[in-house]
Amino acid sequence: MTTDQTIVIVGASLAGARAAQTLREEGFGGPVTLIGEEDETPYERPPLSKDYLMGKHGREKLYVQPREWYGENDVDLRLGTRVTDLDPAAHEIVLSGGQRTGYSRLLLATGSSPRRLSVPGADLGGVLYLRYVGDSDRIKAAFENAARVAVIGAGWIGLETAAAARAAGAEVTVLEMAELPLLRVLGREVAEVFARLHEQNGVDLRCGVQVAEITAGGQGTAGGVRLADGTQIDADVVIAGIGITPNVELAAAGGLAVNNGVVTDERLRTSDPDVFAAGDVANAFHPLLGKHIRVEHWANARHQPVAAAKAMLGQDASYDRVPYFYTDQYDLGMEYAGYVEPGGYEEVVFRGDVPGREFIAFWLGDDSRVLAGMNVNIWDVNEAIGALVRSGKPVSKDALRDASIPLESLA
Ligand SMILES: Cc1cc2nc3c(=O)[nH]c(=O)nc-3n(C[C@H](O)[C@H](O)[C@H](O)COP(=O)(O)OP(=O)(O)OC[C@H]3O[C@@H](n4cnc5c(N)ncnc54)[C@H](O)[C@@H]3O)c2cc1C
Ligand SMILES: NC(=O)c1ccc[n+]([C@@H]2O[C@H](COP(=O)([O-])OP(=O)(O)OC[C@H]3O[C@@H](n4cnc5c(N)ncnc54)[C@H](O)[C@@H]3O)[C@@H](O)[C@H]2O)c1
């Protein structure tokens, strides 16, 4: 890329900001424009359901880069601006005001949006979602006056928010349609750990339920949830965390290949050679796994745009990091490395104390390869777990169970 060429990034959150940073770190001297619909300086979302929600720190700790960084690095940061159309043939995007902006290379870092409830009453005030910093502020404020919180969905948002609601002193009911929390991601063996964690912390966890209606309280606000079997759960606030959908509208408008996200190769290049995608929105070919995957987690949004930015500059960069995520709930902190499709493993082997929540879980394939591993309240082992996953070698189950054997020796 030469300095007379322009790079435009749509989506000014973690993935977008990291791409802009990488372009400058790699010495690109041409114009970089970072366009985002939100009004806030690009920020990270994980604290919104954890420390920020619990009031442990303020906004200043959320930012990917301080606001001054963008000016100092000559990144044209345009906030509060929605991109409404993409014209790959003309190499132009269209902004919400109708203005057209040209690009030489474009990165789509448009992320994802929360799925909305579609049951009667879903539009009542007091039904809250958690994606943006303002949502976290609203939920935090609601916790101050809420004695009873109903959470719909026992995925990551539901469980982390339930933990924060308990910390705020509320009575919490979690309503999940599947048999267990996090069942699709973790499978039964480890999903049970999260069910016990929440029950032991006083959450009324109800799995296998169907939400039929958000019932009205007073003044147009939610007063609770009615289940399909007629059960009524009264609540002062209802929080829904029922998954996300990738923001593919622009890619679709531009005629790019879209299938569960924007389809890219391992260099994060879409079906148009001058358009790239990274973060939650990208369904990228992963060379280690040999298939396309779309990852909805922080580490992917942090690292994938680095590869995308390098590839946009014409470098030989591809993205093959072992997928990683983490959570903090009550006294449980964990990290997970690897990738398992729902039900796509043979066995889970544990090392350590599962009831005491100090253990490592390994998901094994039918050939005893480690597909993924999760360290719970045990630290400095995640890299070794990632190396085991990356090695693709069959590993003895006894060795995995035996805490006296260093994981490094098994990879
Ligand atoms: C509350 C919460 C807690 C989380 N906690 C964890 C965690 O503990 N661990 C973990 O691994 N992951 C966590 N995640 C997931 C992680 O935050 C996401 O994977 C990450 O935010 C994805 O980053 P992204 O930049 O790809 O997309 P996003 O963060 O979704 O950002 C996309 C941005 O693009 C903007 N945009 C979209 N379309 C347009 C358009 N047409 N024009 C202009 N702008 C547009 C959006 O407004 C948004 O600002 C959490 C997510 C949430 C919501
Ligand atoms: N620690 C982390 O990694 C972390 C933390 C927070 C958010 N996130 C990300 O944020 C995004 C949103 O999280 P999320 O928890 O909303 O999604 P999720 O996909 O993790 O979980 C959604 C849950 O809601 C359930 N559900 C769906 N519809 C339902 C309904 N009508 N009634 C009851 N239950 C229903 C699903 O079975 C599932 O358990 C995801 O991309 C997630 O990866 C990640």
Image (cartoon, helix red, strand yellow):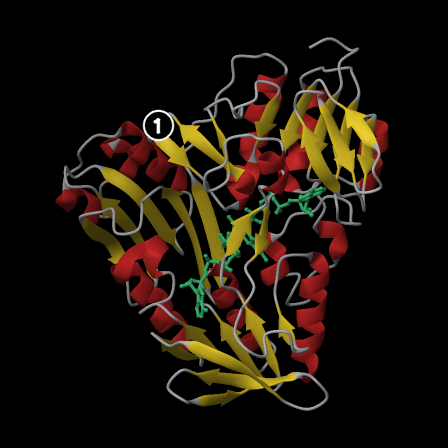
Q: At 69% across and 91% down in the image, what residue appears?
A: 218
Q: Which residue position holds label 1?
A: 288
Which element is circle 1 on? Answer: loop
Asked if residue 267 shows in the view, the reply is yes
State yes or no: Cβ of the residue under disc 1 lies below 8 Å from any atom of ligand 1: no
Q: Quarter holding the N terminus?
A: top right
Q: Nearer the viewer, residue 244 or 148?
A: 244
Q: Badge 1: few (under 14), some or many (20 or more) residues near its Cα, within 10 Å?
A: some
Indicate the position of residue 123 as horizontal and vertical percent values: 64, 74
Q: Nearer the viewer, residue 394 or 383?
A: 394
Quadrant in which residue 191 is drawn: bottom left
| Left or right of 54, for residue 261 | left
Quadrant in which residue 355 is drawn: bottom left
Q: Amino acid at mark 1?
A: Leu
| Left or right of 252, for residue 342 | left
Q: At 38% across and 70% down in the image, what residue appears?
A: 177
Q: Quarter holding the C terminus?
A: top left
Asked if residue 402 shows in the view, the reply is no
Q: In the orientation shown, which residue stands out farthest toward the top?
A: 2
Q: Nearer the viewer, residue 263 or 172?
A: 263
